[in-house]
Image (spheres, rainbow, N blue to C red):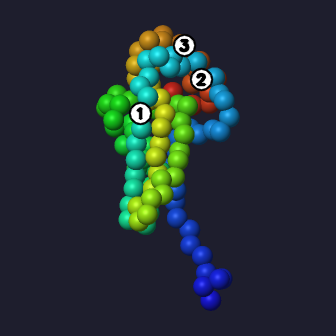
Amino acid sequence: MVAFSGCSMRLIDFTVISSKNVNLKIDKSQGIRVTGNSNGFLGVGASIKDAMDNALMSAGPDYDLLIDGVVRVNDYFFVSGYRVEGTAVSTSKMKAMMSPAEYEAWCKTHKLNSAD
């Protein structure tokens, strides 16, 4: 019976994700390299989303986007979970550096909603 049973669980919710190199024309020098972890006993309670949120929170309240990210699985004796590393950038700071027309064009080029 066990061989035919299964389960499903949500690993991550995302707004933008890609495994390919994408030129977002973001000045990475204004970003902050961050790391976030989410661990639990035998992995219970650990999630990639929590690790990503922890990474963004470590950068500060203005940072809302991770670029050049890597997700790793942590697996120790009785503790396992996820580690997320990436460069945190602030889209509000990026928007402030551009004119409204430039920002609108950037969003259209990258198929993003400019209302946010």
Count of marks, rendered view? 3
Left or right placement of residue 21 versus residue 89 in this view: right
Badge 3 density bin: few <14, some 14–19, many ≥20, Cα 10 Å = few
Answer with mark 1 or mark 3, whichever residue precedes in sequence: 1
Image quarter of the N terminus: bottom right
Residue 23 x/y as whole percent: 63, 23
Q: Which residue is mark 1?
A: 34
Can residue 51 be seen? yes
Residue at (56, 68) in percent of width and height:
8
Residue 115 x/y as whole percent: 47, 29
Q: Quadrant of residue 56?
A: top left
Can residue 113 be seen? no
Badge 1 density bin: few <14, some 14–19, many ≥20, Cα 10 Å = some
Q: Are marks 3 and 2 in contact (CB under 8 Å)?
A: no
Image quarter of the C terminus: top left
Q: Which residue is mark 3?
A: 102
Q: Disc 1 residue type? A: Val
Q: Disc 3 residue type? A: Glu
Residue at (41, 25) in percent of width and height:
32
Residue 101 x/y as whole percent: 53, 13
Which residue is nearer to you in this view: 56 or 15? 56
User: In the image, which is nearer the foreground, mark 3 or mark 2?
Assistant: 2
Disc assigned to residue 24: 2
* Disc 1/disc 3 C-alpha distance (Å): 28 Å
Q: Disc 2 residue type? A: Leu
Q: Quadrant of residue 97?
A: top left
Residue at (44, 43) in percent of width and height:
52
